[in-house]
Image (tube, rainbow, N blue to C red):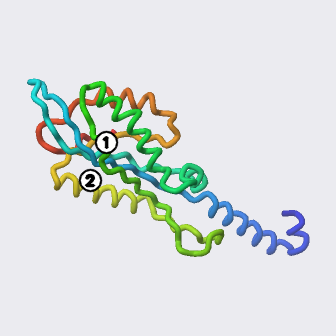
Amino acid sequence: MKLISKKLGIAGFVLAAVFAVSAVRINAQTVFVACTWDTSSIFKDKAGKEKFERRLYVSPVMAMTKEAFLAVDREGDRIEGLCGDYLDKTVMKAAADRGERLDPGGTLRVRRSLELSGEDIGSKNMYKFATKEDIQKLIDADVKEMIDAGRFIMYFNWDTTGKDEAKDLANEQKRTLPSAAPKSTGKP
């Protein structure tokens, strides 16, 4: 910056500082992600009678840097695999421990606030970013649609770093079976 200020004076220095801050802001943009999983469960009720129900598991909206997101999703759609792995290690394991059989297929969806803008690869405007509120609206619409379809809504924690996996598994193991009528089981 000293070299720039000598050549351009104070005004040039201020202008260079503004551009430097803008460049940092572009590189540190936030990506918001949330995961949903539409599946079914077969379990035995307290009387020992086998029951079937449809469920929608919903994660909270999480924030990560663009760079962290691209590192995870470097091969395209890897973020879905990350959510699926986390569900296997927490929700599916806890359900199996309770004697439930969750359909391992189902429909997994990750809502993300980052998409290609359609501009040339490598351009500074290569990506479009949605807001956290935009992603939350999409999740809320998914939840409403599934409640209207008679699904039980089950909230689960998804930690993209995996650091909270043991804690999230313990929380899932404490979960009780849903009641007789579809409803939201509350956010974690």
Please give the label number shown on residue 51: none
Above or below residue 188? Residue 141 is below
Q: Left or right: 185 with respect to 121?
A: left
**Pointer 2 residue:** 143
Nearest the viewer among 73 and 18 is 73
Residue 72 screen position, x and y as percent: 55, 49
Q: Residue at x 52, y 40 (%)?
A: 161
Q: Secondary structure at mark 1?
A: strand
Which residue appears at 20% of the width and 45% of the height? 54
Residue 5 location (% of width, % of height): 86, 69
Residue 66 picture quarter: bottom right
Which quarter of the figure is the N terminus placed in?
bottom right
Q: Name the residue at 61% across, 57% down.
A: 28
Residue 138 position, x and y percent, is 34, 60
- Numbered-mark total: 2
Name the secondary structure under disc 2.
helix
